[in-house]
């Protein structure tokens, strides 16, 4: 009886693993993001699966993919369109000057912490494979094992810490299917200084050692105002001219003496 019970358990496990393989197959998550100095993000996300795998579940690949997507945690919101080529079917999400506040999903976290940018993408099996876990909780671990990830994030500042590969101001990760995966993909990078409300005009003009643009602009404004005042004074109408002084009246000439 024990032998029969072990065989039954082994059969159920094999069926569950086959279900996971049919659902996930070579499912891929590709993500490329660029963080801008104004705390916005530009890039795209691609979530795909092999058509051959999807068709084994449902001849309608769109319906099969919609079912498969239920096993993926929430993705950052963006302009979503269908993606399809000869071998893969999925979705493409575009981001253009998207605020950082939209990158706090269950799958991708990208935020600013003072003068630092922090990126993380958890690879916790509990976040993936929720649908297949309804048959057997062990399916979640198998689902994560069968997924692959290719991620790239470019920051405006220097990368300070990461478990990925650094190339200048960019960090990349390539996590292949059927291989052990880290608990998360993470990176920390420098963020540009934010202007303080208490900065004095002189300090703002100095810009931390940069060219004093504010002082130059202020000087130009003062000169323009002075020029305007001079022009107005020159154009001001003058008062009536003072009357010329009258010529002096000649003294009367005394009469000449008459001859006696």
Image (cartoon, rainbow, N blue to C red):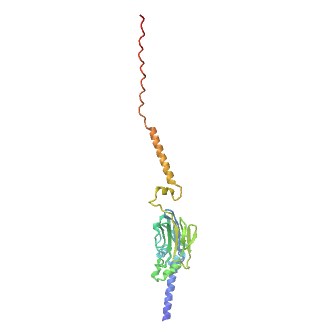
Which residue is most to the top? 260
* Residue drawn 50% across the image and 48% down it: 220
Side of 167 relative to 6 (left or right): right
Q: In the rendered view, would you say 6 is above or below 179? A: below
Q: Nearer the viewer, residue 238 or 22?
A: 238
* Residue drawn 50% across the image and 70% down it: 119
* Residue drawn 49% across the image and 86% down it: 12
Q: In the rendered view, would you say 2 is above or below 70? A: below
Which residue is most to the bottom? 1
Q: Quadrant of the C terminus?
A: top left
- Point out residue 127 in the picture as x, y percentages from the top left corner: 47, 77
- Residue 151 in sight from this viewpoint: no
Q: Which of 40 and 64 is in front in this view?
A: 40
- Residue 116 in sight from this viewpoint: yes
- Point out residue 48 in the picture as x, y percentages from the top left corner: 52, 72
Which residue is most to the right? 167
Q: In the rendered view, would you say 32 is above or below 176? A: above
- Point out residue 205 in the picture as x, y percentages from the top left corner: 49, 55
Side of 192 relative to 237 (left or right): right
Q: In the rendered view, would you say 76 is above or below 23? A: above
- Point out residue 72 in the picture as x, y percentages from the top left corner: 48, 75
* Residue drawn 48% across the image and 46% down it: 224
Count numbered badges in the picture: 0
Q: Nearer the viewer, residue 6 or 249?
A: 249
Q: Nearer the viewer, residue 206 or 144?
A: 206
């Amino acid at each position: 009886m024990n032998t029969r019970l072990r065989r039954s358990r082994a059969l159920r496990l094999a069926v569950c693993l086959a279900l996971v393989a049919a659902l996930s197959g070579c499912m891929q998550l590709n993500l490329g993001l660029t963080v801008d100095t104004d705390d916005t993000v530009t890039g795209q996300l691609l979530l795909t699966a092999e058509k051959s795998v999807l068709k084994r579940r449902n001849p309608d690949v769109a319906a099969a993919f919609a079912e498969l997507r239920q096993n993926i945690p929430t993705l950052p919101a963006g302009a979503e369109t269908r993606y399809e080529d000869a071998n893969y079917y999925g979705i493409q999400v575009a981001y253009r000057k998207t605020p950082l506040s939209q990158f706090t999903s269950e799958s991708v976290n990208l935020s600013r912490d003072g003068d630092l940018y922090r990126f993380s993408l958890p690879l916790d099996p509990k976040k993936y494979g929720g649908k297949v876990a309804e048959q057997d909780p062990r399916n979640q671990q198998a689902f994560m094992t069968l997924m692959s990830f290719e991620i790239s994030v470019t920051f405006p500042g220097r990368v300070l810490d990461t478990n990925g590969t650094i190339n200048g101001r960019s960090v990349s990760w390539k996590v292949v299917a059927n291989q052990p995966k880290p608990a998360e993909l993470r990176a920390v990078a420098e963020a540009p200084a934010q202007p303080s409300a208490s900065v004095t005009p002189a300090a703002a003009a100095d810009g931390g050692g940069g060219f004093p643009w504010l002082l130059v602009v202020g000087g130009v404004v003062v000169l323009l105002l002075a020029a305007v005042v001079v022009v107005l004074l020159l154009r001001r109408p003058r008062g009536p001219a003072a009357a010329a002084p009258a010529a002096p009246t000649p003294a009367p000439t005394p009469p000449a003496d008459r001859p006696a």
